[in-house]
């Protein structure tokens, strides 16, 4: 099967979806599929600082085409970038026809895939991911219409978990039966436990440094623990829109001797980052399905997170991790205190998480699910019962497009 995979900010950008794409592409190539990836990227200084940015690197066995988001960089003109994606997909289809177009994110990539599907007569599959499912469509009428048309008219819509599906259904009015749940996955061969027995436990935050991921809440909780003389060190690994705010918060709270802001981490180095830690902290407000939590589980870390969309589907409080309410700094501090002061509890939670991760979230299993969807939609005609016309409305993401 010939697959066009449309990605948003593939490596070297900092994104769990880059990890997801890399592993899925490997499974597709390994199964004998002919894969072309069309990937957007930020090439400007702001985009590079916030998300890593830059053209996508080669991927073994995949034809990779990088498209700089020139419209997005020029005042949030997403429409120009969507048109560029459609033309690129059409040109590649003319070179060698695709059997399916699979886009990550409902907007802008999914909208581009839906437009290309209509134009080329090829079925479309769209994966609804994290942020675009949580807030895109609540920002303006343009993006709401684009999202609802993608959700209602793509040949298949994939989503990571039930709690996320319910959120999107409630927010955008999508019928639940439109979604096929395909969970996140982790390469359990790369992410393995280290068997540490530390004198001072290490807390790890790894991922996008973003207030929406709870990174500032985590620093406030760390300050509470430090005031009680609880022993720990904290590593904050990654970059993002709130990197400067997080560094300023560390200094203001007097945590410079306990907190290391590690900055950008190359994906090849990430397994060792987990192995040098003991507890993974993810006080996120919402996820599509957290790849970093799965990586932490596979690495033998105890997980402390929140009762939020995309987390409650894989972490159960007191069973394979600890959960507090999103934004509850004292509750987060209490959960961290519990695992920092009780090594046996920390080990129990980590062992339960590791066993579940190996049983349920391997890439071999998830790759087969995605390929099963491709086989189901192959040969289906696109749904043509929708309009391509979108009003161009003011939107907060036009002012800060890198946050979309």
Image (cartoon, rainbow, N blue to C red):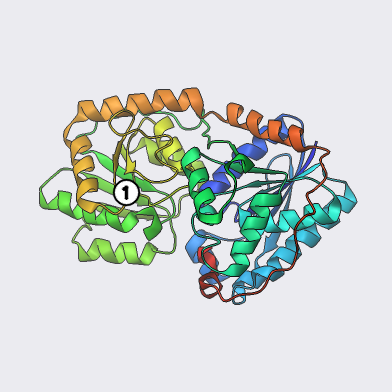
Q: Is residue 319 above or below residue 8?
A: above
Position in image of residue 366 (x %, y %): 59, 31
Q: Can you say which quadrant of the picture contains the N terminus?
A: top right
Q: Residue furthest left?
A: 228
Q: Is residue 369 above or below residue 82?
A: above
Q: Is residue 392 above or below residue 312?
A: below
Look at 66% across and 39% down and name the residue there: 25
Q: Is residue 183 above or below residue 111?
A: above
Position in image of residue 333 (x %, y %): 21, 47
Q: Can you say which quadrant of the picture contains the C terminus?
A: bottom right
Position in image of residue 395 (x %, y %): 54, 73
| Residue 298 occupies quadrant | top left
Q: Determine which residue is flagged by label 1.
A: 235
Secondary element at tag 1: strand
Of residues 271 and 283, the one nearer the viewer is: 283
Mark 1 neighbour class, 10 Å CA radius: few under 14, some 14 to 19, many 20 or more:
many
Total numbered circles: 1
Of residues 328 and 209, the one nearer the viewer is: 328
Look at 43% across and 58% down and name the residue there: 239
| Residue 342 occupies quadrant | top left
- Is residue 115 toward the left or the right of residue 201 in the image? right
Position in image of residue 22 (x %, y %): 61, 42
């Amino acid at each position: 099967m010939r697959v066009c995979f449309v990605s948003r900010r593939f490596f070297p950008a900092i994104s769990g979806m880059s990890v997801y794409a890399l592993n899925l592409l490997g499974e597709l190539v390994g199964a004998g599929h002919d894969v072309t990836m069309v990937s957007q990227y930020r090439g400007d200084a702001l985009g590079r600082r916030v998300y890593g940015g830059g053209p996508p690197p080669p991927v073994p066995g995949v034809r990779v085409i990088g498209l700089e988001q020139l419209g997005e960089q020029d005042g949030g003109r997403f429409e120009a970038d969507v048109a560029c994606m459609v033309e690129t997909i059409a040109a590649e289809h003319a070179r060698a026809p695709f059997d399916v177009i699979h886009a990550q994110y409902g907007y802008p990539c999914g909208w581009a895939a839906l437009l290309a599907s209509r134009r080329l007569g090829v079925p479309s599959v769209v994966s609804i991911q994290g942020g675009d499912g949580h807030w895109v469509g609540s920002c303006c009428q343009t993006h709401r219409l684009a999202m609802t048309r993608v959700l209602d008219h793509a040949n298949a819509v994939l989503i990571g978990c039930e709690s996320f599906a319910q959120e999107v259904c409630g927010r955008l009015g999508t019928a639940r039966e439109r979604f096929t749940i395909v969970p996140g996955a982790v390469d359990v061969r790369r992410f393995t436990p280290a068997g540490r027995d530390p004198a001072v436990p290490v807390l790890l935050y790894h991922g996008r440094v973003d207030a929406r991921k709870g990174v500032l809440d985590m620093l406030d909780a760390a300050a509470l623990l430090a005031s009680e003389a609880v022993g720990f060190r904290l590593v904050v690994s990654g970059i993002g829109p709130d990197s400067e705010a997080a560094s300023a918060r560390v200094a203001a709270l007097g945590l410079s001797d306990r907190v290391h802001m590690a900055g950008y981490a190359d994906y090849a180095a990430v397994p060792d980052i987990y192995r040098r830690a003991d507890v993974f902290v993810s006080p996120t407000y919402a996820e599509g399905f957290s790849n970093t939590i799965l990586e932490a589980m596979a690495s033998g870390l105890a997980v402390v997170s929140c009762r939020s969309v995309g987390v409650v589907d894989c972490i159960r409080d007191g069973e394979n991790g600890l959960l507090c309410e999103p934004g509850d700094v004292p509750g987060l501090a209490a959960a961290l205190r519990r695992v920092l002061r009780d090594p046996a509890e920390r080990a129990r939670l980590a062992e339960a998480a590791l066993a579940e991760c190996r049983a349920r979230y391997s890439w071999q299993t998830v790759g087969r699910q995605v390929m099963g969807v491709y086989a189901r939609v192959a040969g289906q005609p696109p749904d043509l019962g929708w309009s391509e016309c979108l009003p161009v409305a003011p939107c907060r993401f036009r002012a800060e497009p890198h946050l979309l």
